[in-house]
Image (spheres, grey):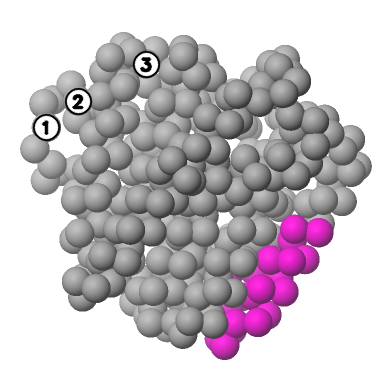
Amino acid sequence: MIALMEWKAQVERALESFMTRLDAPEQLRASMRYSLDAGGKRVRPALIYAVLDAYGVSRTTGDATAAALEMIHTYSLIHDDLPAMDDDDMRRGRKTNHIEFDEATAILAGDALLTNAFTCLLETDASADIKVQLLERLAMAAGAAGMVGGQLDDMLGERGGIDDVEALESIHRRKTGALLVFAVEAGGILAGANEDDVVHLQRYGRHLGIAFQIQDDILDVTGDAEKIGKPVGSDEGNDKATYPKLLGLEGAKTALAAQVQAAEEAIDALSVEATTLKDLLDFVVKRDH
């Protein structure tokens, strides 16, 4: 997928520009960069650029917002890997932040990425009104009503605490989906999309988020540890509720197909041709890591 590589390179340039100018102690900067530079698919920033492409708006319009979003996603991964959370030693094929540095530095690196993400977003070349909209929506998506709240409910639901798909979907709409929804609605706002289109983009983001999580769960059963960059089967080992566990592997694949169809219908309802969003949806479903 050629466009994905272009979007990935674009946000990485924006991240490099921001981090080069950031005033921070050297160890903190090194820890932040370690996780930012770990690679990854950059799906969230890619969604911003994909929407801008669909509306014929320059990608540079989304650089600061895309970088801010990736900083928040990266902070969440640093904290997820900590001993008090998922207690992982490997992330994307190399040592997790707290193993490479230490727990205190990793916590502070995550704190700095979260906080400075909002100063990064303020560099967006847009009106004050649009900046306020983006700040509010990103805070909601990343905070207690979104990603953080979903993460806590996911932790509380471990060890057999979740036994129905509706509860599982509620968790992942927030834990995984909230930032994905923000990405597409931010792209729409920056592109000047009409209100109906923003609603369709939000709907697409919600279904994409669930599809992303179902595919993650499937890969934890069927994936290649070398490609994924961490051991497979960890969800089963931790007795976590997953789509394959609740629905069976074939049932999870059926649920994935339903989410993909709903996301495609949301794309088709847009006032513009958005093949880039269909390409990203296809990538999420067919990825092997």
Q: In the rendered image, which quarter is residue 97 located in? A: top left
22 lies above or below 156: below
Residue 232 appears in view: no
Left or right relative to 37: residue 64: left
What secondary structure is found at the residue carrying circle 1? Answer: loop
In percent of the image, x 44 and y 18: which residue is there? 82
Foreground residue among 20 and 6: 20
**278 falls in the magenta region:** yes
Judged left or right of residue 124, residue 250 is right
Are circles 1 and 2 on residues that touch, CB within 8 Å? yes
> Which residue is label 1 attached to?
24
- For marks 2 and 3, give the CA distance: 12 Å
**Displayed quadrant of residue 217:** top right
Compute the Cα span from label 1 to label 2. 7 Å
What residue is rendered at 57% in x and 88% in y?
271
The outermost residue toward the bottom is: 271
The mark found on residue 98 in the picture is 3
Residue at image mark 2 = 28
In this view, the residue in front, 150 or 45, is: 150
- The residue positioned 84% from the left and 47% from the top of the image is 253
Q: What range of the chain is rendered magenta?
A: 258-280
Q: Residues within 10 Å of mark 2 (few under 14, many from 20)?
A: some
Please state, as top left, top right, bottom left or bottom right, where the C terminus lies in the image.
Answer: top right
Query: In which quadrant of the rendered view does residue 171 lie?
Result: top right
In primary-sequence order, the first of circles 1 and 3 is 1
Query: At which x and y percent is residue 232?
Result: 69, 23
> Which label's residue is closer to the chain start, 2 or 3?
2
